[in-house]
Amino acid sequence: PGNINQAEILESMNLKIDKVICLETEDKVIVERMSGRKICPVCGAMYHDTLKPTKVFGKCDDCGGANFLRRQDDNWQTVVDRLKTYRMMTTPVLPYYQHEGLLETIDGTGGVEEVAEKLKKIIGF
């Protein structure tokens, strides 16, 4: 659940929640990750300014396309605003699930594979 209201709705539905997973990452890392994303307009390949740059600057590795697109909501200010909303709306839900023994917190600053392995351990996959 993303806020108290959603948590209350889930509880009223008598749905069994096994785990609530919180990925913790510093805001500056989240802002860098999200604001650096870009996509090839020709083939849809995804890149990142620093984490997954193209081999040749400005050219898609897969199709040679150029003029990469960025999602409008992946700009610095939008990401910062979304983080503020998250802190205001979602953070208050976490103590409830922690008290219930359901909250699992993962450091999300690692690479995709590393974080995925942590998630797999928690969900028993």
Image (cartoon, rainbow, N blue to C red):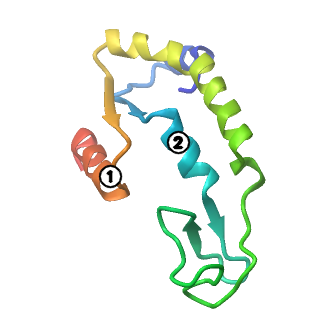
**Residue appearing at x 33%, y 37% in the figure:** 107
**Residue appearing at x 53%, y 42% in the figure:** 30
Seen from this angle, which residue lies furthest bottom?
A: 63
- The residues bearing labels 2 and 1 have C-alpha atoms spaced at a distance of 17 Å
Instruction: State the residue in front, 70 or 21.
Output: 70
Q: Amino acid at mark 2?
A: Ile
Which residue is tagged 1?
Answer: 116
Residue 23 drawn at (x, y percent): 40, 35
Secondary structure category for the residue under label 1: helix
Q: Is 71 on the left or on the right of 7, as rendered?
A: right
Chain-order first, disc 2 or disc 1: 2
**Residue appearing at x 43%, y 36% in the figure:** 25
Which residue is tagged 2?
Answer: 30
Q: Amino acid at mark 1?
A: Ala
Circle 2 crowding by C-alpha within 10 Å: few under 14, some 14–19, many from 20 = some
* Proximity of marks 2 and 1: CB atoms separated by less than 8 Å: no
Residue 17 drawn at (x, y percent): 38, 26
Residue 98 drawn at (x, y percent): 34, 14
Q: Is residue 117 above or below residue 29?
A: below
**Residue appearing at x 55%, y 13% in the figure:** 8
Secondary structure category for the residue under label 2: helix
Q: Is residue 10 above or below residue 113?
A: above
Q: Is 96 on the left or on the right of 123, as rendered?
A: right
Instruction: State the residue in front, 69 or 76.
Output: 76
Instruction: State the residue in front, 76 or 103.
Output: 76
Q: Nearer the viewer, mark 2 or mark 1?
A: 2
